[in-house]
Amino acid sequence: MLNSIFNLSSYHWNPYSVPYYLVGMLTLVEGIFIFVQNRRALVNAAYALSCLVVSLWLTGMGMVFNSSFEATALLWARWYVFLGIIFITPSIYFFSVSWEKALFPGRKTKKDKLVIVNFLCGLGFYFLCLNSESFISGLWHNSWGFYPKAGWAYIIFVAWFYGLMILMLLNFIAIYRREKDLVVRRQAKLMIAAFSIAYLGSLEFLLNYGVSLYLLAFVPVFICITIVGYSVIRYRMMDIETAVHKTVAWVFGNLILIAPFGVIFYFSRSWCHGLSNLTFFIYLSGLLLAFLIFFRAFQPKIDHFFQRRRYDLEAILSRFIDEIIHLKGIGKLSQRIQDTIKETLYPQKVDILICNQAEKKSPFLVWLAKNNKIVYSEFIDIDPGLAQIKEAAKWYFDNTSSVVVIPLVLGDDLLGLINLGKKANLKRYSAVDFHFLNILRNQSAIAISNSLVYENIEEQVRVRTEELVEVQNQLTQAAKLASVGTLAGGVAHEINNPLAAILTNAQMLLASLDDLDADELKDSLELIEEATKRCRVIVKKLMTYARKPMEVSEVVVVDLLEVVEKVNSFLGYQLQQENITIAVKAEEAQYPAVGNHNEFEQVVTNLVLNAKDAIKRVKKSGQVEISLSKNDNWIRLDIKDEGSGIPKDDIPKIFDPFFTTKDVGKGLGLGLSISQSIIEKYKGSIFLKSKEGEGTTFTVNLPLAG
């Protein structure tokens, strides 16, 4: 049986076979091309299978036409030609169902079962073709070559063929009616037209019944694959990447796997000679099963080699997602997105734009926000979805010098855009590139949204902090002015004595101006000068204390002993008028700490005045003891009074703003709170020890200046 097939003398030149070979091979190449672009997609595999069986039919008919002997032609017809013809409609129906499922993934249907049933029916017809003359009873002898003669059961196959053809066309019509996307609707129309034309080739069934006409069945098939190819190139149907070199490389790699089994089959042909049809079918099935096992084991390695760029992109995306989780600033995040795209796709430029409300009113940007699709400049004229904003889209691409715009949409909000220029290698952006960009933009939109929220929160915190600092400064000044008010009586009394001296000497000079000699006049003027200077010193102390914080904000090394002495000279006279004395104890000459002189004076003043008030609650006279000490790292300031002490329940709240133990109208409750803020600002601490009826000691610790 096989000797006649492999014997070249069994064939002759027949020009009628050439178109069948050419169209058959073109169909096979298109099927392989579409399959390798997305091997995991069922719709691509189904279309490739359809192309394979059509190729078997056409190339097989070419071999039948080239056969010189009826026996050889009949072998080709039974084993090869009808393996293609029988499975044409099940395969194309499978393709229509797969495409429908890809477009409507959530839609439940029983068509999957019908696909399986029809393939099983096809196997039944094929078995009948191999083993019974009821299907193919012989060959017709025509002027262009042999042609299979239909048996009595052949009409059943023809009826099944056309019935399944109608179901397939109904599937494409259903897709056209349900789909709202204009591009997909155009694809569906093209599929209806393509396969309707292709099925005109089935008119060759007439030749099976003896009609002697060369019907050019390859012509409608050629038109069909041309229409599908047009749809692939223009609308990127089935997510096809137009890269022919990848297809050729993939086919070559897989031919390496097929070659060993071709060699086995070739050298076993003599052994197969004389086998019955059933035995040969079993042998061929076993060889095919072994090939499938071998192919399944090694083919993924071939795929990995030719799809390694896709795997590389997946690894890049994984690293990118891990990295942007830790980036919060919009600047750093934008830079990371730009770097990832540049290092992966090599565009000549990458621009990331954050949209404001005014920009979002642009018709093109409104469309991007609504549709959330990547737009490629090459598709502007052919994508019906862009028809209404075509001019706006062209204007955008022209003015940004970009060829791809990637919207960053979260919810219904257009956060920003990524504009890509042409590739540095001048290649087109591929389907794999757009798949990569789709995933990257989804993750980028989330990250940018988080960054914008984060920066907005930071800005709000900054504004609130500035407001709080301003309020704190105002409260600090209010507390100072309250203290100034408290001191006003004592200051007025202190100033009164030098003013009296000034007034007395001035009156004396006026009364005896003519009788005074030069020495007496000089003495009186010197007394007036001294009294005036004393008043100036008193007023200067009061003004220095009452300054606003922002006017004296210099941080320097401050001697705390000097601070205590200034406060003592400032408050000492007033406290003496109230029978309160201040005792300062310091063993060292200096106690340097880093801070602001005016702020430290405010702290000591607050604590001394509080101590005075505490003493006056229970006594008519008393003493405030101020002591300074230090070690290698810290300075300690203790201010102790003999006053009423603080109730135990009030101690936890003593540093709270506006909390006071004084009578209503005699305190703002800010002095201790402000004092604590000042001390903590310079890395220090303040605490107290108090027992009701026995007095209170406030302790301030500040780092020793190096």
Image (cartoon, rainbow, N blue to C red):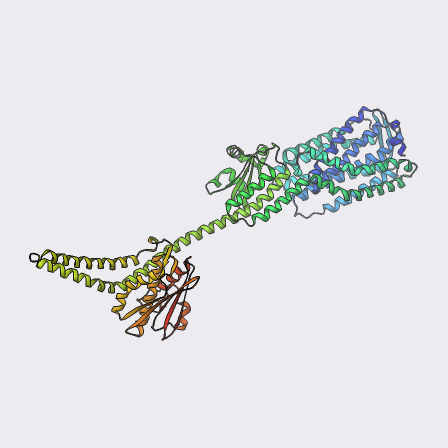
Residue 220 rendering spot, x and y as whole percentages: 73, 30
- Among all residues in the image, which is located at the extreme left? 514
Q: Nearer the viewer, residue 695 or 666?
A: 695
Residue 55 rendering spot, x and y as whole percentages: 77, 33
| Number of residue marks | 0
**Left or right of 236 in this view: 536:** left
Residue 673 rendering spot, x and y as whole percentages: 38, 63
**Is residue 195 shown to the viewer in this render?**
no
**Left or right of 536 in this view: 268:** right
* Quadrant for the C terminus in the image: bottom left
Q: Nearer the viewer, residue 221 or 583?
A: 583
Choose top left, top right, bottom left or bottom right for residue 687.
bottom left
* Residue 203 higher or lower than 510, as above or below: above
* Residue 291 higher or lower than 219, as above or below: below
- Among all residues in the image, which is located at the extreme bottom? 693
**Is residue 478 shown to the viewer in this render?**
yes
| Residue found 41% across the figure and 73% down from its top | 648
Q: Nearer the viewer, residue 703 or 520?
A: 520
* Quadrant for the N terminus in the image: top right
Choose top left, top right, bottom left or bottom right for residue 289.
top right
**Left or right of 674 in this view: 264:** right
* Residue 695 higher or lower than 513, as above or below: below
Q: Nearer the viewer, residue 607 or 45?
A: 607
**Left or right of 243 in this view: 690:** left
Residue 43 rendering spot, x and y as whole percentages: 70, 41
